[in-house]
Image (tube, grey):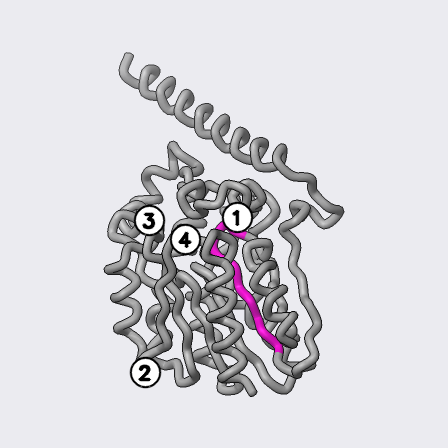
Amino acid sequence: MIVPVVLAVVAAALANRIRIQRGVVREYASRFGVDGDGIVMGAEAFRFSGTNGCGVLLLHGSGDTPRSLRYLATRLNEAGFTASAPLLPGHGRTPEAFARANADDYVRAAREELASLKATHTRIAIVGLSMGGAVAAQIAAGSSDVRALALLAPYLVPPPTIRRVAATSAWWGLLAPYLKGRGEASVFDPVASGESRAYGTFSPRALDALVETSARGMSALPRLDMPVLVVNSERDNRIPRECAEQALRAFRATPEVHWVSGCGHVITIDYCKEAVAKFVVQFLERNTS
């Protein structure tokens, strides 16, 4: 009697897992149209050509898209910079594609875009948002010709809860293919939140990739030798202040640090986006000429 019951329970659990997975994929696809390349409308990569000879690589966060960097890119472009924001592997497509990408994929794609910028620009800078900050730190540490680095709400020290969830993902992932990402708390501005193309969910593998990327980014901080700007949010729902301050202590040289208020984690689209853009533009103007 026990074996049939166990098999029935397992079958029911697997069926529920498939139902959840299909529901998440269907829900994301229903919100936005998809172009011919399978990319959600509004989530695509972009490049704004500038006039001052400096190319800026902008890297978005985990589960997000270049859309979250478009306002900042516009401000940089108005100041003369070329602003290029690639769509990282697995992003802006489907939650299933997000589940397949890994930390190596993110760095590879960022380095490819950096090489493209270097081919046409004499001066280079990098801006990274959230997990994009961890990716940015890695490639900046290995690029002697990057003149300046801006890290915006960089995801470098995951909170203990996230580390525990990631460490046990092999177990809970058997029953729960996706977890809610609490994205609604990351942007206070309801209009900006509604326009986001972020997935809003994490798979076990996507969470593992995030934690691995953050660890690699953290280990790169002592090797950075260019001017660095760090902007954090006072009310960041993803990065507690103690985690942000732990990351700040890891730099070899003291970076320029600013704290913004009145916004959540995605500081480039929230109510503080103007202040963030001003910090970044002024920092790059001072350090890339």
Figure disc tally: 4
* Disc 2 target residue: 253
Q: Amino acid at mark 1?
A: Phe
Is residue 225 in the magenta section? Answer: no
- Tag 4–tag 1 contact (CB < 8 Å): no
Which of the marked residues, 3 or 4, is nearer the chain's N terminus? 3
**On the rendered structure, is 87 left or right of 163?**
right
* Disc 1 target residue: 98
Q: Which contiguous range is marked in magenta? A: 55-64
- SS at mark 4 in the image: loop
Tag in front: 2 or 3: 2
Q: Amino acid at mark 3?
A: Ala
Is 71 above or below relative to 22?
below
Which of the marked residues, 4 or 1, is nearer the chain's N terminus? 1
Instruction: Locate residue 76, reporting x and y percent.
Output: 60, 70
- SS at mark 2 in the image: loop
Tag in front: 3 or 4: 4
Q: CA distance from mark 2 to mark 4?
A: 25 Å
Which of the marked residues, 2 or 3, is nearer the chain's N terminus? 3
Q: Amino acid at mark 2?
A: Ala
